[in-house]
Amino acid sequence: MANFKTQVAIIGGGPAGLLLSHILHLNKIDSIIIERQSKSHVLGRIRAGVLEAGTVQLLRDVGLGSRMDKEGMSHDGTSITWEGKPSLFIDVKKFTGKTFMAYGQTSITEDLFQQREIDNGHIFCEASEVEINNIENKHPEVTFVHDGKPQKITCDYVAGCDGFHGVSRHVIPESQQRSFQRNYPFGWLGIMAEVPPYKDVLYGYHSEGFALASQRNPMLSRFYIQVDINDKIEDWSDDRFWEALMRRLPDEVTKNIKIGPSIEKSIAPLRSFVSEPMQYHNLFLAGDSAHVVPPTGAKGLNLAVSDIYYLSRGIIESYKNKNNKYLENYSKTALSRVWSAINLSWRLTKMLHTFPGEDPFDEQLRQSDYDLLLKSEALQQALAVQYIGLPFDV
Ligand code: APR
Ligand code: PHB
């Protein structure tokens, strides 16, 4: 068995794990990433693409802003359209003084992976049988198999950044863990097309279901529609997708949407999930390993980034100044921000989707939610504050 020593063993090389490793490196703290998938698999994943102001600033602060600032598309606000009612532009900049950025998680992962390689970061890809041992001890161990050989890493801290299907969360005894979950009775069918995007990130409500226009760069568009939870991707030809999208959005929008062949098409279920606490002895969970949000509002990546902001601050303070205060409060601090994003994405999901089997009372409440939003600048401001994201620094 090969034995390695590091300060922080990071399970999972998605955006959370890669960003943590990068920030620790900037602070001269050594880490090793253990990733289950291949590099090409990690870099090929397509996820959401709206970055809160705090995420944009953090990426710039850690030297990862240059491609984002070149290719990303900055926005002052976001649009909502509604069948039979006027459209609304939530002027985030007017209400908060901040802008957000449309820039894909796929590109962020590429930027992070490339930077870790430039800095000779240690990443084991295609690791199997990953296990965390002795987490209650001062020096926990992570074991796994790589290239057919058993490997062991001894460390001070383990960061569980291995997503919803990872192993880290399950190290916490069930008796000391509490989880909260809501599964939504529909999915999102997403499509990527190499055509210039619609000018805004636009959320559309229609009695047939939700629709969303988004973007990746000036030549790459991303669209979604709400579909039945049991639908298969084979049920959805490109033509059927575009026709449904066009029916669900108003003419003033659809006349400005360019259509083209899909280069990617997939269906994702929608789920809200939180597992508490996010710490157990020397194990710290971050990102999707501890919480999942439905994509409405695009909070998933932003939460992974804010978790890593709090976790890296805690680890750095503990090494540099022997100050454990931030690490001790990590779970509490991170969870407070997590619940505000869980709340927003649940509310947006509820307002913008049709729910199979709901009664007319629910539908009237949904219509009333939007009518109130149309009439009240205060409610628009409240939405703008949550959409742009709460400040990290607390
Ligand atoms: N051992 C090692 N790695 C693992 C294991 C395991 N047992 N299980 C999963 N992984 C890896 C996955 O292959 C993936 O690369 O952990 C990584 C987790 O990455 P993500 O799922 O992208 O999660 P995270 O880094 O927390 O980023 C959160 O991703 O799911 C989106 O919408 C979500 O935007 C959010 C972001
Ligand atoms: C996306 O661009 O993929 C996206 C944008 C906004 C959302 C969700 C997803 O709310």
Image (cartoon, helix red, strand yellow):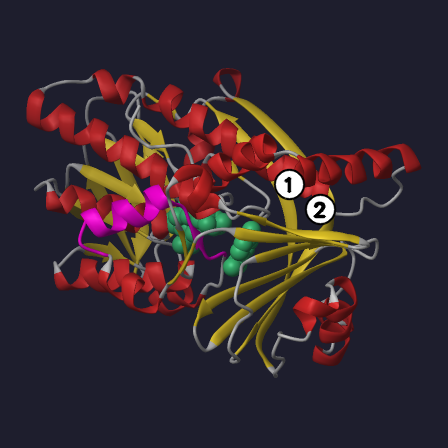
Ligand 2: does it lie within 8 Å of the C-beta at label 1?
yes
Disc 2 and disc 1 in contact, CB within 8 angstroms? yes
Rendering quarter of residue 262: bottom right
From which residue to which does the magenta span run? 48-64
Q: Amino acid at mark 1?
A: Leu
Q: Amino acid at mark 2?
A: Leu
Measured in 3D between alpha carbons, the distance from the residue under mark 2 to the one under mark 1, in whole angstroms, is: 6 Å
| Residue on which the image places disc 2 | 352
Task: State the residue at coordinates (87%, 39%).
Answer: 358
Ligand 2 image position (quadrant): bottom right
Residue 348 disc label: 1
Task: State the residue at coordinates (74%, 64%).
Answer: 250
Q: Is residue 93 magenta?
A: no
SS category of the residue bearing label 1 = helix
Categorize mark 1 by other alpha carbons within 10 Å: few (<14), some (14-19), many (20+). Answer: some
Q: Nearer the viewer, residue 137 or 359?
A: 359
The location of residue 381, given as percent across then percent down, is 53, 35
The location of residue 46, given as percent across then percent down, is 49, 63
Q: Is residue 285 left or right of residue 371?
A: left
